Image: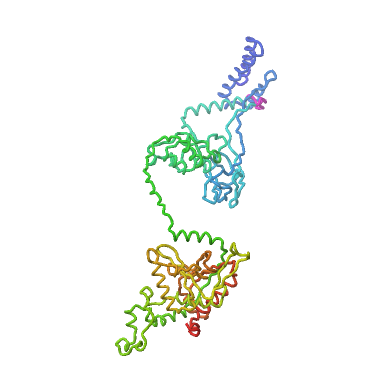
Amino acid sequence: MLRSTTNIVGFSTASAARRVGGRRSLSTARRTTTNFLACTVTAGSRRSSPRASSSLSSLSTVEGRSFHTSRVWQSKKRETFKLADIGEGITECEVIKWSIQPGSRIEAFEPLCEVQSDKASVEITSPFDGIVKEILVPEGDIAKVGAGLCIIEVDGAAHPSSSSEPDTKTPAEAVAENAEAAHAAKNEKAVPTEAPSKRGVHPLDPSNTTPRRLEDLRLGKHPSKGVFGSKKDSLFQESPGTSGFAPSAGSANVLAPPSIRHLAKLQGVDLAQLAPGSGKEGRIEMSDFEAYLARGAAPQAEVKEVSVQEPEPEIVVEMGRTRHNMYKAMVKSLEIPHFGYSTTLDITELHTMLPTLNAHIPAKYLPPSIAEQRQPLAIRHGMVNPNAILSPTSQPLPESMHYTKLTYLPVLLKTLSKAMMEWPLLRSTLALPSASSTSTKPSLAIRPSADIALALSTPTGLYTPTLSAVQQSSVYALAATLKHLSFLGRQVPCALSPKEMPRRGGTLTVSNVGAVGHGETASPVLVPGGGVAIVALGRAKWVWDVNRRAEGERRLVLPVSWSADHRVVEGAELAAFVECWRGYVEDPVRMVAEGV
């Protein structure tokens, strides 16, 4: 049958060539013959024999020409998948886990690996369909942004070959293949199949020319899903404060942080009008948003006006005379170089002795009612009279000098005067050369007595009354003077007079800040004409001291802070003077032998 078919083919071909004539007609005849042969072989291919195949092979050429067939090929391309920017300021990440192995097949949007940055752990998905050929960064290693993570052999699309080279297949084989392809196509048409779902392009796929957002580029989210896993990003969901404002379609592709997107919603601003921004890759920064509002661009939506209460106007108060004098004195104090020194004094012995001193306050310093109660019973009942032969000549003290309890301050002032008498430097004042003086050197004026100024805070300002010749006053007399100065300072206006505040002042100033606060250290300030040193007394407190005994003991300590005029007093001299004062304070019994 095949031989008959061959003869028929040859006869038909020759006949067609003679009727039409020329090479063009002969080519047309060949195509017609080939189609006829394909149908014949398809019908009888199962009954054909090797002999028939050999007969068909003799038709491989016609007048020296080969049959030409088109081939279908599948392109393969290797892509290096690089680590994208996954966060602001992140330059490298640690690869925690690979979800695939070399040689494994992976599809787009399937988990590829998990990386850990300084801020968060991110799962990266594959942008390609293909086979993982090589992992460039093992688990536990650091990958730089922009460096390759792995190599993926990507599946390309099918393309017809444009090669003009003749196929080596015989006409029988080519006809058989075409026949089988036609038969398969006919069967496929008979069975309806579902159309494959169209899948979106991965944001990291090089063929994707319009990525959605910076968040998609970092995380590799499926385009059908938002960054938060929903069909619609929660960033664009309407909030109660937006008053129905909806961003334009172009704002979805704008690179902007969530904070600016939130402000844009509140202000009714379309971010598409601001793009591209001044940030990286056109990212809109806060400066771009503020500049847009400063240009007076009208928002798209009405913003609810919020009434802002105007702040109350400031009240301008002029400084009083006393505070203004303090202001000028503090400005002049900047001319004095200060030397600071801080330490603590153990006043445990003084604390033990104070109840005894309080029990024997002289009657003239006590209120009359208290003084009468403390008199001996014989005097109180008139049995004896101490002034029987001589009436007292001293005038009674004013009520402002009466007190019933001693404090530490009078004793500290007394002991300080003892140390000042041993250190003439602390009883001196600095005398600068005047315009009429022939000498250009400053001089020191040393006083014969220990004059101590006291910083006194009053309702009208800060004053520094002076206690003159403190070394000549008793502890009880000093307590009465302090009580009287405090009374005068509390008067409004202040009742302190030049008698209590002489022009030359004291050579050393004491500030009892511990009576107001619980501070332990201070930095007192010297003013011109205020002497050569100033000390701030803190608040006494009980501590556990192990310096005296190995087992330790409870002691009462007083923090003191000094500042001295470094133009006159050396640092070693101030420290030595404080140690001299410590000897009197920590052993107050010494004053008994020296005639308190």
Residue lying at the far left in this picture: please name it: 381
x%, y% of residue 152?
59, 41
Q: Which residues are magenta?
A: 163-171
Tell me the quadrant of the picture where the N terminus can be found: top right
x%, y% of residue 73?
61, 31
x%, y% of residue 490?
38, 66
x%, y% of residue 53?
63, 25
Residue lying at the far bottom in this picture: please name it: 383
Q: Give the quarter of the image for residue 7.
A: top right
In the rendered structure, the answer to whether residue 392 lies left or right of residue 453 reads left
Magenta span: predominant SS is loop
Residue lying at the far right in this picture: please name it: 64
Q: Nearer the viewer, residue 143 or 585?
A: 585
In the rendered image, the vertical position of residue 140 relative to residue 28, given as above or below: below
Q: Nearer the viewer, residue 26 or 550?
A: 550
In the rendered image, the vertical position of residue 516 relative to residue 283, given as above or below: below
In the rendered image, the vertical position of residue 461 relative to residue 66, given as above or below: below
